[in-house]
Structure formats: structure tokens, C-alpha cells
Image (tube, coloured by chain):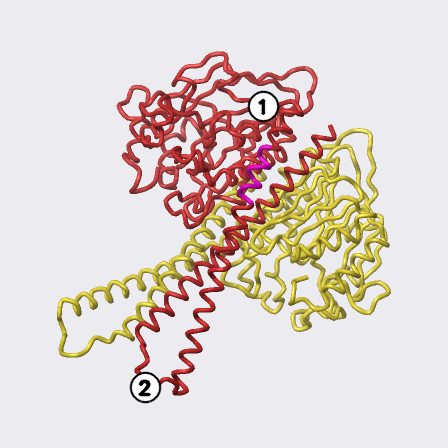
Chain colours: A red, B yellow
Amino acid sequence: AIRYLSKRRQERVGLIGDWLRRQRFDLVLLQEIWSEQDYTDLVARLGSCYPFSHYFRSGVIGSGLCVFSRFPILDTLLYQYSLNGYPYMLQHGDWFCGKSVGLLLMGGLTAVLPPSSHQLHAEYCREKDGYLPHRLVQAWELAQFIRHTSKAADVVLLGGDLNMHPQDVGIRLLRGCTGLRDAFAEAAHFEGCEDGCTLIPKNCFTIKTELLPFPQGIRIDYILYKAVSSFTVQCEELRTTTGTAPGMDIPFSDHEAVMATLHIQRQGQAVGDSLGTTVPTLADVVTEAQAEVGVGLRAAQRQRYSTGRMAVLALLLLLLQAVAALGALVGLGTEQPFPKLSFSLLAFFAVGILLLATGLHLFHTMEVKMLQGTEEQLRMVLRVLQEQ
Amino acid sequence: AIRYLSKRRQERVGLIGDWLRRQRFDLVLLQEIWSEQDYTDLVARLGSCYPFSHYFRSGVIGSGLCVFSRFPILDTLLYQYSLNGYPYMLQHGDWFCGKSVGLLLMGGLTAVLPPSSHQLHAEYCREKDGYLPHRLVQAWELAQFIRHTSKAADVVLLGGDLNMHPQDVGIRLLRGCTGLRDAFAEAAHFEGCEDGCTLIPKNCFTIKTELLPFPQGIRIDYILYKAVSSFTVQCEELRTTTGTAPGMDIPFSDHEAVMATLHIQRQGQAVGDSLGTTVPTLADVVTEAQAEVGVGLRAAQRQRYSTGRMAVLALLLLLLQAVAALGALVGLGTEQPFPKLSFSLLAFFAVGILLLATGLHLFHTMEVKMLQGTEEQLRMVLRVLQEQ
């Protein structure tokens, strides 16, 4: 819901509000509510059924994350990803928003809202996916964040657009390291789009060319959960909308809504936290992720080098110009007039290149550091796994 | 330890390495090791006594945080502050580094390394301290981070330069919300600088003018701790260096080293996590912090407005120029030659102002959002406290 850009935004926000009021869920997690005005409208509309709500503020545009709940929200925390696309990829916009993971504490329930990012939507680029290392760093950071913040929780819930297919290495890393279970795979009863897809060609707001290789659509929105202490969680039912909002002629959003009915039960003795998969499987996933991060690291190092070289060249050009200007000042080459206009245009050009290349160089330096840090953390995990 | 800038850097890093090897601490937390080469040198020097070490990578320059330990480091996490000074205050450098809090898990011990920031060092500006709201947001985020990540820990340890005096609202907020205790106040035995000061005029690397209002020095480096579950922690001894390194003629650093001997004991029954102060005192601290954050918010809103206005003015100037250039092209005012040089210089100037003002506007927009978010979280805490 981007102001002035998204189609039929206010109408859809209104429909979402009416529908949520009728459905009376316990907990609603929303992404991409970019305009705080829309959030305020929803609060006004939903206040009677969902007395507790929170909007996570961050970045230039905002996180777009908000939550409505029938139960009190006791505490919140925002965690920023260290890597989030490139600032110069303006059309993806990820760098300016969506950098933050939101966390809610509601008694023993810890609910996590991932930021939605647009880096995967270009499905036609899946073969040469330059963003993969960034997404892996994010999946890893999300897993680390969940592991570190949910130790004292009874139940952990992660819901939202993860922009990864169920078999992608990022999802396997996240699930393997946290032990989160996929509501779609576990549901006793399912109702909705085929294979649980949440981005489908039938939805009139999806971009059809992006979905060409996937005629059924793709499943990239998840509800994941786990029980940590003396509780069990079972997914009784999972539903998705199917292209249009129930009883309407337009969809709520380009993504289908995902709704889960979870049965949470206290059991006798406390059980320890466990990994999601066996140790050898997890070690394989971590190795795979490490290789991909390594590929990204080498690309970032190349870019850091080439932007640095460009900055140095621009600086040399400026120095050359300074020498030429000094030469003209002390009276060398007075036989022909000094070309003031082209000279100042060239200087303007050189300064521009210098600033741009320096900025990019700093950015890629940061990228290299973060990828190195993640690679090292993955190595540490792998060592611990191998010792087991 | 900044390469090429810090005085006698390599000599001091060598001294620190030798001394740590002789002292055989259990755990060493270091800040401002900006050069990874220095870290690698320390690892080579200390490998035999401290077999476990970690360097936290982040930002353009790095976090500067590293740790050496006699016991295994099982897991690490890096958390980025959302606000950290202004990118245009190059001389403070905080924006380019020191943005991240490091967390270590070592069995039941959670150790936290805060980033060191330079925003408080200008002690002569303590009266009109424009950074106070940023520091409060950081103190709040640090408190939140510790609360959310340490729930399953036995013992939590926070050590480093917090850049706040013991009575500052930020320290009171941090201690009140987390229940962390100050090793200096609790120590059975103390040995070192008067009042536990860690930035003293006697140290030859401190800037004397900054310490003029404090002839004894100031205490801004802390070791804070708490026991969470069925443990008790007591500080048996606290020591600081006193201007020079023991047995040397120069100090290790401009800050004095702080060393604590903690006695950790398992006790019979588990005790719940408790707040550091009584509810009314904590409510007062939160109210005070909220007021300061409000002041910062209004300042940020003013700056957002004025930078936005400047960007609009620069855009108008460019539009005017475009109109003038079009006029010249279609042949208006041909009686006098078109002033190409001054025209392109003016355009250059306007583009520069436009870019600068837009960048600043985006930055202050982010600042406003983060301050609003913190103010709201503080309000939520205050409501919970008032209900108690």
C-alpha cells in the first residue's frame, strides 16, 4: 500500500479493515502498510475488536509492519538487517525501507514479523540471482534473532512474506537453525490456492510476466511456528484467499492472505529447544549457504575494487585539471584562449564521478564486511555441528 | 587504535597483548580495535592463553569490538542501533562505525559489548548537548536488547565505554530497565583511580580541555552484571589502571582499563528476573527520558522541515534556470550574449545544494521516525508501570 502509487489503495485498506473486523482473529500481522495514515485508519476501524495494536517505525519510509491483537502486547523490539539490497537500486526500494524485523511479546507468545523485500520478485532472474547472498545473510540474521530472543518463550510464531520458495536454501537454513515448523506442511486441513501458493497469476494485481515460469503461482508467504517450553502447537487448519477477497470482486493485495488456526496446549514436562532437522542435514544446508555467501563475498570484493579504482581515476582527472588551471594562471599556453566552459563541465563531471564512486566504494566495503561476518558465523556453527 | 592517526598504536597494542598474556583473565572485552590487523596480531600473541576469540564486523570501518576468552564462545549476535549521530559530523565518526552491540553466548553467561561512541567526549558542551536524545535512544535500545536476549541466561555481563556519567538519565534508564548492577558500587574491594574514574587528566592521551570541569576525571567505563536464574553474582574486587600501564611509562589507551573479579555461585532455588529499582523510581526515570526524547524529536522535526525547504528552493532555482535556458534557445534576449560560465556554475551549485538538502532531509526523516518509535515504546512501558 504505497501512497499515490498502489492501485485502489484506500478501497483495499477499507476492505481489509471490514473483513478483519468480521473475522475476529486473535492476532493479525500486516506487512507493507507504508502509510501511517492507513495504519491510523485501521486502528480507528478495528479498535473495538482488536484493542491492541502496534506500528514499527524505521528507515526513511518506515518498516510497513503493523500488528493488531485481541491480547495485550507487552513489549516490542525492532532489529535491523545489516544488509538490504543496494541504495542505487531505487526501483526495488529495499534499501530505503523494509530493513527491520519486528518482535512482539504477548505473555508466553513471541511473534516475529519479517520485513518484506522485493528482491525475489524478479522471478525471471532466478538463474542469475545477484541478491541471493543478501537474502542468505538476512535468513541467517533472522534465524539468529529468533534463536536469541525466543529462549524464554512458550510459543514462537513467524508470519509473513519471506520472499523465498519452500525449497530455497534460505528457508532451509532458517527452519533448520530455529526448529520452526511450516504451517502449510503440518496443517490437518487446508483450503485455498493449489499447493498453498500466495502469489498467483489469477490475482489481478500480480505481475504476470514474473510468474510465467510458475503457471500455478509460488508460495513465498509463510506461517511458521514452534513450541519452546512445556507446550505443544498443532496447526488444525490453514487457509488462503484465492485471488479475490471473499465476497468481493478485487483482491485485498497482490499476495494472498494466509490464515492459520493453531491449537496450543500445555503439556506435563518441559521439553528442551530442538533443532528442526538432523545434524547432518543441517550441516549440509549450512555448507550450501556458506558457499553462496562466499560467491557474494567475491562479487562484493570485485565491486569494492572497481569502484575504488574509479574514484582514484576521477581524483587523478581533477588533479590534472588543477595542474592545467594553474598552468593557465601562471601564463603558460596563452597563445590560445582558455576553454572555460568545457573545463568547468569536465570538472563538474569528475566531481560527480568521484562522489558517486566513493559512495559506492563505502557501500561495497560495508557489504564485504557483513558477508565476511556471516561467513565466519556460519563456519562457527559448522564447527559446532561437526563436533556433534 | 586508529591506523595512521592514533599515537604509538602498534607499541600500545603490543603492550596490551603482553599484559593480557601475563594476567590470564577469564574474559577480555576490547573496544575500538579499528584495524583488523591489530586484532590478528593480538590473536597470534594471545592464542595460547585465550584460545577463543571473536571480532565483530560491521559498518564501513568496523565495530572495533573484539573479545578474547579462556572459555568457548558458543554463539554471537550483532545488533545495530537505529540512530547513531549524524553522517555529516565527520569529526565524530560515529555514523561510520560503532553502530553495533555485540553479544556473546558462553554457556550460561551472556556477555554484551556496547559500541563506544564519541558523542559525549566534548564535555564542554554538556550544557547544550544535542546528542542527548540519540544517546537516550541508544541506552533504551541497549536495555531492550539485553532484556530480550538474556531471558535464558544465568549471568549477564555488560562491559565497556558507555559514554555516560553514573548519574546520567541514560545509565539510570539502562540499569532500571535491565536490573544490571554496577561493579564499582558493589565491589567489596576497590583499587585504582579516585571515584573509579576511567578518563583522567593524568593520562597523557586524554584531551585536557575536555576534562577541565572535572579535575579528578570522569567515570564512563563500566562493568555491569546481573544474575538471572538460580545464580548469585558478587563483585569481590574492582581495579582500574591509573594513568600508565602497570610497570610501563605510557598508558595502554586514553581510557583506563577496568578489571573485575566476580564470584558466581549457584544457589538452591531459581529466582525470577527483577527490575533494578522500585517501580516509582523507574517510572520517574522513564518520564525523564521521554521528555528528553521529545525535545530531540522536535529538533529533528525542525531540521527535517528546514532541509526539505532548502531542497525545494534549490529545485525552484534549477527550474528557473531551465526556463532561462529555454528562453535563450528560442531566441529571447539575444541583444546580450548568454553568460554560459556563470550559468553552468550556478547550475552546479544548485544541483549540489539539492543533493545535499535531499540527503539531509531523508536522514532527518529517519531520525524523526526512530525518535517517535522510542517515545512510543517509552509510553508503553510507562503505562505498564503505572498499572503496577
Estimate the x, y position of residue A276 in percent, counting from the top left.
61, 24
Identify the disc placed on residue A226.
Answer: 1
Instruction: Name the residue nearer the viewer: A217 or A14.
Output: A217
Furthest-top residue in view?
A188
Q: Work out whether residue B179 or residue B12 is closer to the camera in this orientation and state it.
A: B12
Q: Is residue A131 above or below residue B261?
A: above
Numbered disc 1: what chain?
Answer: A
Who comes first in sequence, dot 2 or dot 1? 1
Of residues B173 and B209, the one nearer the viewer is: B209
Q: Which residues are magenta?
A: A288-297
Q: Is residue A148 magenta?
A: no
Which numbered disc, 2 or 1, marks the residue closer to the eye?
2
Rendered image: mark on residue A335 = 2
Displayed quadrant of residue B191:
bottom right
Task: Write the residue at 40% across / 66% down.
Answer: A350
**Which amino acid does the dot numbered 2 rest on?**
Glu
- The residue closer to the viewer here, A46 or B46, is B46
Calculate the distance from the C-alpha at mark 2 to the C-alpha at mark 1. Answer: 82 Å
Q: Type of residue at label 1?
A: Lys
Where does the image place residue A355, in percent across and percent down from the top left? 44, 62
- Please give left or right for residue B125 compared with residue A86 in the image: right
